[in-house]
Structures are given as structure tokens and as C-alpha cells.
Amino acid sequence: MVYVLGSFVAGYLLLVGALYAFQRNLMYHPDQTIATPQTFGAPDMKAERLKTPDGFPLLAWWKPPPTPDAPVLLYLHGNAGHLGDRADKVRPYLDAGHGVLLVTYRYNAGAGGSPSETGVLEDGRTALSFLRDQGIGDDRIVLYGESLGTGVVVKLATEKRHRAVVLEAPYSSIADVAASIYWYVPVRLLLRDHYDSTSVIGGIQAPLLIVHGRQDRVIPVRFAERLFAAAAEPKRLVLVDEAHHTNLYDFGMGRVVLDFLSDPPVNRP
């Protein structure tokens, strides 16, 4: 009996140690594809390399706004895939006359970096600096986050006031999601990267849109609802009954976002 118990404890500790050691392998999925806009149906965009302060050349696709007052969408994507996988998602905004900057992270597209919350946040700030260098003010920038990218966007949105914030399939925190999967492990004590959006989202002053699928099994809808509850007004929550984690655009998310940008919610007296 003592032997069995000892073996169980040893196995459990080995499991916990493996999850701690390899947690970033589970959270981030590097993709070294150097996708070009022309190959993925976005010939009106141009590939750029944006160098971070610590020297990583981030791959980005850029389409300047056609008019001096047009909104510019900064799109920060999820933890896997490449820029070409998001070409269809940004098409509605390009066609609507918005500028778009679609940027990937330091661990992708040959940039040479390793994933971490600190590094990915720096990547987001680098993208914002690029837009400001183009003469685009924060009052014209729409911060758009997809999945993992929502945690980056929420943090960036608390640092300056922007035109609007859009979150596609967001989470309340990585700890909440991880604890729902690995309920048998003290994940909150083990995590290196927290992306604790709930604790900071109240600092966003711009109009906020959250869109989430009710059938999402990657990030269950309850985490989006928790995040929305913590956010300050003005805000809007759109839950799509049939959608899961990756197919919100099949259910008209592009139209939802454009309608939101043209008629954002306002604070009520």
C-alpha cells in the first residue's frame, strides 16, 4: 500500500514538473511560415518587418488608410498559425476603407525569438509604435485581438485611449482557462504567463466589443462573460449561438465589427 501510494505521488509530481517545464509549448505554437499577402489573397497589403527594441524583426502586413481620417485596425492574432490564415478575416475592413496592420509575434516567421507574455506584449507595443510613426494617432487606432491576442490587446488598451477595442473569442485569464483543463494541478501557482485580462480590463476607456461563440470548447463562453462583466462602459457583448472558437467569421463577425465601429456604444448618464 505504501509502495502504491509512493508511486502515485511520484507520478503526480513528475506530471506537475512536466507541465511546469513545458507549459509554453502547450500555450504557444510557433509557425515559421513567411506568408506573403499576394499568396493569400491580399495583394493590396505590403509585407513589412518591424524591429522590436530588443532586436526581433516581426513580420507584418500593412495597408495604409486611404484617407487621413479613416480608422486603422491593429490585428493581433492567436497562439498558432500565420498571417495568411487571417487574410480572410481582415478583408472586410480593407474593403470598408480602413487601414490594417496585421502583425505576428517574435516566435513566428523567422523572427528568432521565444514566446513569453513579456515578449509578446513588447511585440504589440512595437506594432503601435509603427502606426504612430506613420502619423496615425491613437484616436484612429482600433485594437483588435483574437484569442491569445486578446490578452495583449486588453493590456495595451489600458495604456492609452484608442478609438475602439475588439476582442474575438477572449479569455478572462490564462489561469482560468488552464485551471478548467488541468483541474488536478495547481496551475495558478505554476504559470509563467498569466495574461490576466480581468484584473486590468476595467482600465479601458474606449468603446469595447466582445464577440464569442457559445459552442466554443477551447475558451468556454463563461470566461468571455466574466471578462465582459469586469469591463467598464461603454461596452457590447455579442454571443453567437452556433459558433465555436475559430469560425465566428462564418457567422458574420466582420459585419458585427463594422457596425460596431460605425455606431459604437456610449456611456449613459
Image (cartoon, rainbow, N blue to C red):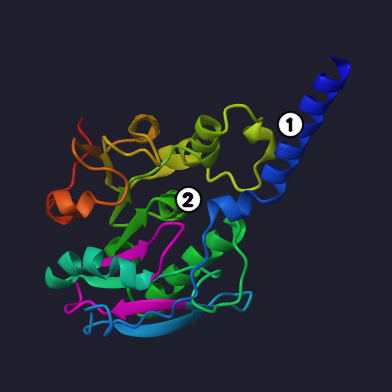
37 up-or-down from 108: above or below: below
**Which residue is the extreme one toward the right?**
2
Residue 158 placement (x, y as % from top left): 45, 49
Which residue is rendered at x = 81% and y = 21% of the image? Answer: 4
Give the magenta part as a residue range.
59-82
179 up-or-down from 103: above or below: above
Q: Quadrant of the C terminus?
A: top left
Residue receiving disc 2:
155
Based on the picture, tell me whether residue 238 belongs to the magenta stretch: no
Residue 143 placement (x, y as % from top left): 34, 58
Q: Quadrant of residue 113?
A: bottom right
Q: Amino acid at mark 2?
A: Lys
- Earlier in the chain: of badge 1 and badge 2, it is 1
Badge 2 element: helix
Residue receiving disc 1:
12
Q: CA distance from mark 1 to mark 2?
A: 35 Å
84 up-or-down from 238: above or below: below
